[in-house]
Image: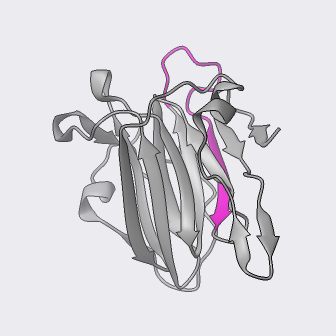
Amino acid sequence: MPFTATPIDGLMIFEPRVFGDERGHFFESYNAKTFQEVGITNEFVQDNQARSARGILRGMHRQTGDAAQAKLVRVVEGSVYDVAVDLRPGSPTLHHWFGVELTADNKKQLFVPRGFAHGYLVLSETATFAYKCDNYYAPDAEAGLRYDDPTVGIEWPTVDTPLVVAERDLSWPLL
């Protein structure tokens, strides 16, 4: 099975089967039946893509209420350290975080259920990050969590350049 469970319930790593030969490679980045076999039945309605340089930290973003989003995230070019923080009320892993390196080469993807804050740090010179969402972007429901919240204690990798974090992301509250 191409899925690996993480220590946080519902947060799953997907590693697609890759077919390669002298021409290059092919893989299914998403197949609804494959995901349904492990209980992921979200209907994705929006695809997004972002390109950033080394040291760019985007996050920790989420949408609240009826606008909450599950995401299936991957890297098309380059490398990022991807992080999800469990903010689901009543969850036994509330405020726990999980991080994984996603690269164009390893083709790993992370399924992030609704109720998580999500962000990533670009490790390569540049990275193209793509993700599916199961709900439409709703600016009024946008929320976040500081990437450096001491209660959560995310252990971000070191990059050889100063971090660049948007003012908006620096303004998110601590827990």
Residue sitting farthest toward the top: 90
Give the color scheme: rainbow, by chain, secondary structure or one colour.
one colour
- Between residues 76 and 31, which one lies in front from this camera angle? 31
Q: Does residue 92 show up magenta in the picture?
A: yes
Q: Give the side of residue 11 with respect to residue 119, left or right.
A: right
Q: Is residue 37 visible?
A: yes
Q: Position of residue 92 (x, y in %)?
A: 65, 19
At x 53%, y 85%, the residue is: 125
Where in the figure is residue 111, as x and y percent of width and height?
A: 59, 40
Highlighted range, magenta: 87-103
Taking 61 as reference, is 138 above or below it?
above
Residue at the image point whose x is 64% and y is 52% from the top:
28
Residue 148, position as x, y percentages in the image:
48, 55
Horizontal side of residue 144 vs 89, given as left or right: left
Quarter-wise, where is residue 91 in the image?
top right
* Residue 101 as seen in the image, left or right of residue 173: right
Residue positioned 63% across, 70% down in the render: 104
Picture quarter with the N terminus: top right
Residue 25: image x %, image y %?
A: 72, 71
**Vertical relation: 43 (above or below) 28:** above
Q: How many marks?
A: 0
Instruction: Answer with the quarter of the image where residue 77 lies.
Output: bottom right
Q: Residue at x 57, y 51 (%)?
A: 83
Q: Quadrant of the C terminus?
A: top left
In the depicted structure, whether residue 23 falls above or below residue 68: below
Specify whether residue 110 is painted magenta: no
